[in-house]
Image (cartoon, rainbow, N blue to C red):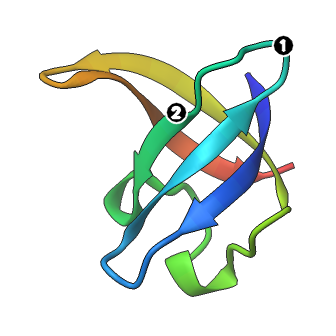
Amino acid sequence: MNGTIKTKTDRGYGFISRDGESKDLFFHSKDLGGITFDELQVGAAVTFDVVDGDKGPSAKNVKLA
């Protein structure tokens, strides 16, 4: 799936604005693929997989597009 980094926190997580979806998707720094949390910038285009977790859907395998 494709999206854009909407927000990042200093606690190692953030939210992705998904293309074609109204609800943002949570991601955690441990779910990144091939990049570091510091390399991600707000507004960056990313690709990711959506998985269902204990607290609802979240992004895994987040990579720069």
- 44 relative position to 42: left or right: right
Coordinates of residue 3 in the picture (x, y in percent): 78, 36
Type of amino acid at the residue the image marks with label 1: Gly
Q: Nearer the viewer, residue 59 or 32?
A: 59
In the figure, 62 relative to 41: above or below? Answer: above
Q: Does residue 51 lie above or below 35 as drawn?
A: above
Query: Are discs 1 and 2 less than 8 Å apart at CB?
Result: no
Instruction: Sort mark 2 into few (<14), some (14-19) or many (20+) by Cα contacts within 10 Å.
Output: some
Helix, strand or loop at mark 1: loop
Quadrant into which the N terminus falls: top right
Residue positioned 39% across, 18% down in the render = 51
Residue kind at label 2, given as amino acid type:
Leu
Tell me the tag on residue 11. none
Q: Earlier in the sequence, mark 1 or mark 2?
A: 1
Above or below residue 20? Residue 59 is below
Q: Residue drawn 71% across and 55% down?
A: 5
| Residue at the disc numbered 1 | 20
Q: Which residue is mark 2?
A: 25
Seen at 50% across and 57% down, the residue is: 32
> Is residue 34 found left or right of 28 in the rendered image?
right
Q: Estimate the x, y position of residue 18 in percent, counting from the top left.
A: 73, 28
- Extreme residue in the left direction: 54
Q: Quadrant of residue 40?
A: bottom right
* Residue 4 picture location, percent across and down: 79, 47
Q: From the viewer's side, name the closer residue of 28 and 22.
A: 22
Are there few (<14), some (14-19), or many (20+) residues within 10 Å of tag 1?
A: few
